[in-house]
Image (cartoon, rainbow, N blue to C red):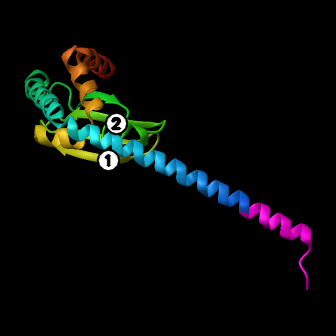
Amino acid sequence: MKIPKSITAKIQKKEERERKERLHEIKEEKKEKQKTNKHNEKEVTLYLEKLELSKRIFQWTKEGKKIIKDAIGDLSLYHGGWGHCSPSQIHPGCWAAFILENNGTISYRAGYKWMGFRAYYDLKKPEEIAKKLNFDYLEKIWHHLNTGKVFKDFEEEIDDDA
């Protein structure tokens, strides 16, 4: 039996379309890998700055434990997008929280909207904070703490509980 030319042509057209789509996917994957590599290189060069920010944040939480001791429970010190990966890996609906737990532990939790945790870290030392979280996220946490915006969040939590 001979396959009609029209079917052969459609098969060839489909194969060509799939080949082009795959080439496009490969290009996009290569771009993503380059972005991630660039981000990782930046994170390595900024490690000392990340460590310094982490030490300041860690010190703030030590003082923060005294301020909120037994007052509220776990406190979200900062919440926003993901801080544990390259910004190019962050998609809409991603959330993360940097939390001072009632027992004094610092934790980082991240997930997707309407879903559970994707990442969860207990951060016991400034070095762990600097290794696990990216520079931009650490800057945002420090800004939130240093400017006092965190206290506005505390007030809102207290008001919500009242």
Sort mark 1 into few (<14), some (14-19) or many (20+) by Cα contacts within 10 Å. Answer: few
Per the image, the residue denoted by label 2 is 96
On the picture, is 10 further left or further right than 105? right
Magenta span dominant secondary structure: helix
Observer-nearest residue: 47 or 128?
47
Vertical comparison of 24 with 95: above or below = below
Question: Closer to the N terminus: mark 1 or mark 2?
Answer: 2
Inspect the magenta stretch and tell me whether residue 84 lies in it. Answer: no
Observer-nearest residue: 59 or 5?
5
On the picture, is 28 further left or further right than 41? right
Q: Position of residue 59 (x, y in %)?
A: 8, 27
Q: Secondary structure at mark 2?
A: strand
Q: Secondary structure at mark 1?
A: strand
Vertical comparison of 146 with 117: above or below = above
Q: Position of residue 88 (x, y in %)?
A: 42, 39
Q: Position of residue 15 (x, y in %)?
A: 72, 64
On the picture, is 77 further left or further right than 85? left
| Residue drawn at (79%, 61%) of the image | 13
Are the residues at dot 1 and dot 2 in contact (C-beta closer than 8 Å)? yes
| Residue drawn at (29%, 22%) of the image | 157
| Residue drawn at (44%, 45%) of the image | 115
Q: Considering the image in quadrants, where does the N terminus appear?
A: bottom right
- Dividing the picture into quarters, in which one does residue 95 lie? top left
The image's mark for residue 119 is 1
- Dividing the picture into quarters, in which one does residue 103 lie? top left
Q: Residue furthest bottom?
A: 1
| Count of numbered marks | 2
Q: Which residues are magenta?
A: 1-15
